[in-house]
Image: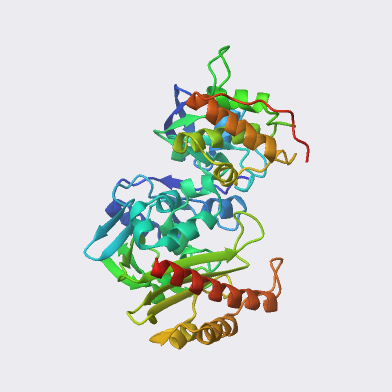
Amino acid sequence: MNKQITVTVNGTQHTLEVEPRLLLVHLIREVLNLTGTHIGCDTTSCGACTILMDGKSIKSCTVLAVQANGKAISTVEGLAPEGGPLHPLQEGFKENHGLHCGFCTPGMLMRATELLADNPNPTEEEIRWGISGNLCRCTGYNNIVKAIEYASAKMRGVPTASTEPEFV
Amino acid sequence: MIAQSFQYESPGTIQEAISLLQKYGDDAKILSGGHSLLPMMKLRLASPEYLIDINNIPGLSHINEDNGVVKIGGLTRESEVEHSDLLKKYFPIFGDVTKLIADPQVRNRGTVGGNLAHGDAANDHPAVMMAVNATVMATGPDGEREIPIDEFFFGFYQTALQPTDILTEIRIPIPPKGTGSAYHKLERKVGDYATAGVAVQLTLDANGNCSNIGIGLTNVNPIPLRAARSEEVLKGKPLTEENIALAAQYASEDCSPSADLRGSVEYKRAMVGVLVKRMIHKAVERAKA
């Protein structure tokens, strides 16, 4: 039996009929056509499907769409305004070569959004623990950490550093 | 992966949820954080006909102190436990354990109640709750009842909870001054199940002897295990290296791990011994701080 739900995604409210077994990530990608959120492992491991639900980062492959009823969802598409400047995290990833193939990037960005909201000035160790639920198949973690440090500095209004890519 | 079809119910009160559980019986499962149940449903290892989502019931999510006891609501998220100042004050062990449970996103959803109610000896909270001597509160058609943690785990994925019960709260006695606690699990990578895990809470008396101790073991037995013989050898005794070594030896002998990709039986037993020693030392350090 389908259920009616109302969800707000990136500020836009949607009222939809969904099958209870529909996963939130499928609602986002296939019903709302927001394909920035990726499906990697589909087993709660890789973090590619990370989105924010009421400000909390969650893996949308392991939450039912019906559970998002009444909630506010943020996806990578909502980080920067249409045609506007990049979000500091997006800018940090661009400036510090925080992405290689880009598959993990939307999940990394959304996870880092909550990380910096909770802890605006994290240490390198706190960043590494903070993204421990997100796998980068290119193993580009060093540059991802620098990208998040860049965004942290920018959001706190202190000078930022762009670096040459680090290959390890 | 898509789960088999089910009917979804989202009751607004505990009474309503219990009525639904009475109506649907064994065909229903309770959906709490969903981070054990939904993966099992996606893999079709579980196919309940009815899912009773308790996430919209108010009053199940809290951490507070009441008359010498810390009460943790059944629906309290792991991330709330991780950052609770109250738990940090009395039970540093919860800071140790939550950091090692899965990853930040999973901890934003996963609940302490679910971690226990799942009845999985590979989960981390059972051993911790044994070490701190917790009591589980279950609410069913006849009201609320107390289940001591030592009577909670029965068998493989089996607990004392009846199909019509909801795990509503966990109660932990606040220990006296001079108490320290610690947890560690050996894991291959972040978020893995334990190769072996050990939880310790101990209290030192004025002479520095161990007046009370709880030791729980993770993922080295078919059901969560209290290292009773290890506790016995230390209770009321001085914490000499000799006594600690004996406690470690007993724990490694009394558990019953199975060989898997995480290691052989011998390796796991050896790691239990190492971790028992380390966690006792860490708990002593904290008790003295």
Residue sitting at 41 percent across and 33 percent down?
A: A71
Front one among B46 and B27: B46
Front one among A166 and B156: A166
Please determine whether, in this image, residue B114 is positioned above or below residue A160.
below
Colour scheme used in the picture? rainbow
Front one among B248 and B105: B248
Q: Pick the quarter of the image with the C terminus of chain A.
A: top right
Looking at the picture, how far across and down is residue B107, in whole percent? 49, 49
Determine whether, in the image, residue B132 is placed left or right of residue A41: left
Please determine whether, in this image, residue B286 is positioned above or below residue B73.
below
Looking at the picture, how far across and down is residue B22, in whole percent? 34, 60
Determine whether, in the image, residue A110 is placed left or right of residue A143: left
Please determine whether, in this image, residue A131 is positioned above or below residue B287.
above
Residue most extreme to the right: A167
Please determine whether, in this image, residue B163 is positioned above or below residue A73.
below
Looking at the picture, how far across and down is residue A17, in whole percent? 47, 31
